[in-house]
Amino acid sequence: MKLYNTLTRKKETFQPQDSKTVRMYVCGPTVYNHLHIGNVRPVIVFDALRRYFERFKGWDVLYVQNITDIDDKLIDRAAETGRTVAEIAEEYTDAYFDLLKKLAIKEPTESPRATGNIAGMIELVKRLIEKRLAYEVDGDVYYRVTAFAGYGKLSNRRIEDLKTGARIATSEKKENPLDFTLWKRAKPGEPKWGSPWGEGRPGWHTECVVLSRKYLGETFDIHAGGNDLVFPHHENEIAQAEGATGKPFARFWLHNGMLTFTGEKMSKSLGNFAYAHEVLQQFGPETVRYFYLSHHYRKPLDYAQEGLEAAAKASSRVQTMIDDTASELAAHPSDKTDETGQEFLSSLEPYRARYIEAMDDDLNTVGAIAAIQEIVAATNRFKGTATGDARLALKDAVALLRDLGYPLGLFQEKGHLLKGIEDDLIRLLIDLRAKLRTQKEFTLSDQIRERLLELGIILKDTAQGTIWTV
Ligand SMILES: [Zn+2]
């Protein structure tokens, strides 16, 4: 399989270092607010890559994603709202995991919190100071970029060029305006941890180095994120990790393109964004996944209502065909098709090969979806004419479509993506029923229970509250 490596600026053959387990790190959210829809792109894209590794390459995946729960943005938000940083972090960490569940994203193997790993960050900063790659001024510690020969290699920039572009006098304390913060001295009232340089907190760039190395080792397979992180975040990670160990950090650097809004980068600070959970509410998880995966992950993608509507149509057409075909044949006792059916199944093989070829070519999900659509068209044609045992081949066609859909998180068993939302909806009805009961509106509350029962959902009142089963 080939993947485009930002570090070498070309597609390279990818194999996990130990040929069994892919060790990958994807930069996670800063939990000061809900995610906007653009932030969901790396989440979906790298989930698809992970699922493809697991299902089609036979590799295990160690997938690590950090939760940034201490940062200037959190501190600002706390000051604005009068709440604590910890309260805000907890609320939006929960919201993040809820979103992953609704989008049917496989949970990361590890989701370390920055605040749970401060000691490791202090150790790294100490080591960088020992190696004269960092220096302390008045309780702050900075990385000395000119001391690291490889600085700029990921983003393909030279320090001299960067210098002319840098805003001078951001800090009088730095030796060089490009030097970045490793440890930040706490102002009164800010969250703080003790360190050899006084009380303060680590910088964001340090966090990802320590958390990736903790679970994946000094040199690991893939480091991924949005291409807005290439500089300075990922460049600064390399400077620290490779500066400290003298060994290569990540072997492959993968970056997705930005979601734009009428051509501009979507961002909270620009105000031209939509929250992910709101888009999800309107369009559902299948549509959002299809929307992203029907475009190449490295290209910029413009967010538009029409794009999502087209994705909704295209994905539901496939899903409906699969569901209808599966239910038509579910009750049939035999799986054995006849010669006509076998011929039809053989005719699908080239499309499967085309799917693999596309996915192997730098995760070209656009080509993969095109191959799936060809199978859908062929299956529909066959469905229109096949009779008797020949129709049983449709079972295998459905199984094939579900197999190819798996990495995309699409076209699975009916309703698999809805579980998170279903649960929320039923909880909503349970809460409503409880409220009606306290108001002695028993006719209405019983109606809720009965209507749910008709749908096959059983409510049980227990000492801990009402639970539901099917
Ligand atoms: Zn990061």
Image (spheres, rainbow, N blue to C red):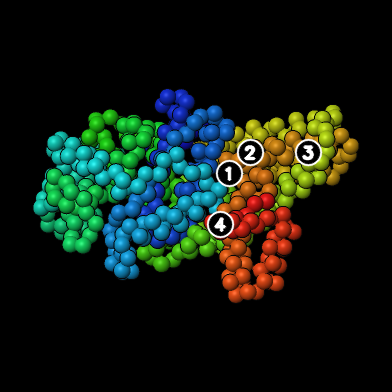
Q: Residues within 10 Å of mark 2 (few under 14, many from 20)?
A: many
Q: Name the amino acid, label 3.
A: Leu
Amino acid identity at mark 2: Leu
Instruction: Identify the disc placed on residue 394.
Output: 3
Query: Residue 308 at what x, y percent from top left?
Result: 59, 59
The amino acid beneath tag 4 is Ala
- 185 left or right, relative to 230: left
The residues bearing labels 4 and 3 have C-alpha atoms spaced at a distance of 48 Å
Decide if residue 210 is on the left or right side of residue 467.
left
- Judging by the rendered image, the residue that carries numbered circle 2 is 404
Eye-nearest disc, 4 or 3: 4
The residue wearing badge 4 is 463
Depth check, front residue: 444 or 102? 444
What residue is at 60 percent from the left and 75 percent from the top? 439
The amino acid beneath tag 1 is Leu
Residue at the far front in the pictured view: 463
| Crowding near the residue tagged with mark 3, few <14, some 14–19, many ≥20 C-alpha atoms within 10 Å | many
Residue at position x 40%, y 61% from top? 33
Dots 1, 2 in contact, CB < 8 A: yes
**Visible residue check, residue 168:** no
Alpha carbons under labels 3 and 2: distance apart: 15 Å
Instruction: Give above or below for 396 relative to 236.
Output: above
- Above or below: residue 455 compared with residue 375: below
Q: Which mark is residue 230?
A: none
Label ID, residue 408: 1
